[in-house]
Image (cartoon, rainbow, N blue to C red):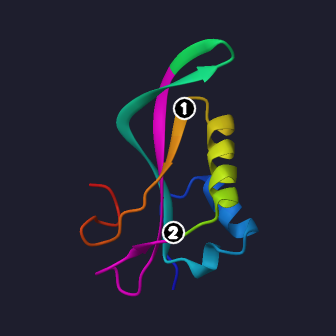
Amino acid sequence: MAWHPKVYPASSTTLIEAGLYGKIWQAYAAVGDDRAVGVVGDERRYGNIVMIRVVDSIDAMTADWTRLSHSILEKMSNRITNEIEDVTWVTYTISSKPPATIEPQ
């Protein structure tokens, strides 16, 4: 069964459109404390970094990151940076569990 907490609308809509939402175990986007510089128009702007995490698992004891196509990742990144004003970067987390955890602490 899929479990999808904390999903940004842009990432969940993209996964649904691609027919992947019900096939993955967990998908979410998180915003941490780090910020990154981006360019809007001709000006530099510091904004938030959104981390997207999509994993496959059976029992949450182990998990492997989901290999999404570049076009899906690009669509999620474009939607998030265009629709959420204070976001300048979007990253995709590719660490498996172990050693990483599924959700950030």
Q: For the residue marked with disc 2, what is the amino acid?
A: His
Q: Residue 12: name its quadrant.
A: bottom right
Say which of 3 and 78 sits in front: 78
Where is residue 25 drawn, in percent x and y?
Answer: 49, 77
- Residue drawn at x 70%, y 58% as measured from the top left: 71
Question: Badge 2, how many Cα within 10 Å: few under 14, some, many 20+?
Answer: some
Say which of 60 and 3 sits in front: 60
- Residue drawn at x 70%, y 68% as measured from the top left: 16
Q: Which residue is mark 2?
A: 4
Say which of 55 and 7 sits in front: 55
Secondary structure mostly seen in magenta is: strand
Say which of 67 and 3 sits in front: 67
Left or right of 44 in this view: 36: left
- Residue drawn at x 31%, y 80% as measured from the top left: 62
User: Upstream in the sequence, badge 1 or badge 2?
Assistant: 2
**Furthest residue in direction top, as rendered:** 43
- SS at mark 1 in the image: strand
Give the magenta range: 46-66
Q: Is residue 33 above or below residue 10?
A: above
Left or right of 7 in this view: 93: left
**Furthest residue in direction right, as rendered:** 17
Q: Is residue 83 above or below residue 17?
A: above
Where is residue 104 drawn, in percent x and y?
Answer: 32, 56
**Furthest residue in direction front, as rendered:** 70
Left or right of 14 in this view: 39: left
Labelled disc at residue 88:
1
Q: For the residue marked with disc 1, what is the amino acid?
A: Thr
Judge whether residue 48 is colored magenta: yes
- Residue drawn at x 68%, y 43% as measured from the top left: 78
Q: Total of numbered circles in the picture?
A: 2
Where is residue 21 drawn, in percent x and y?
Answer: 63, 73
Q: Nearer the viewer, mark 1 or mark 2?
A: 1
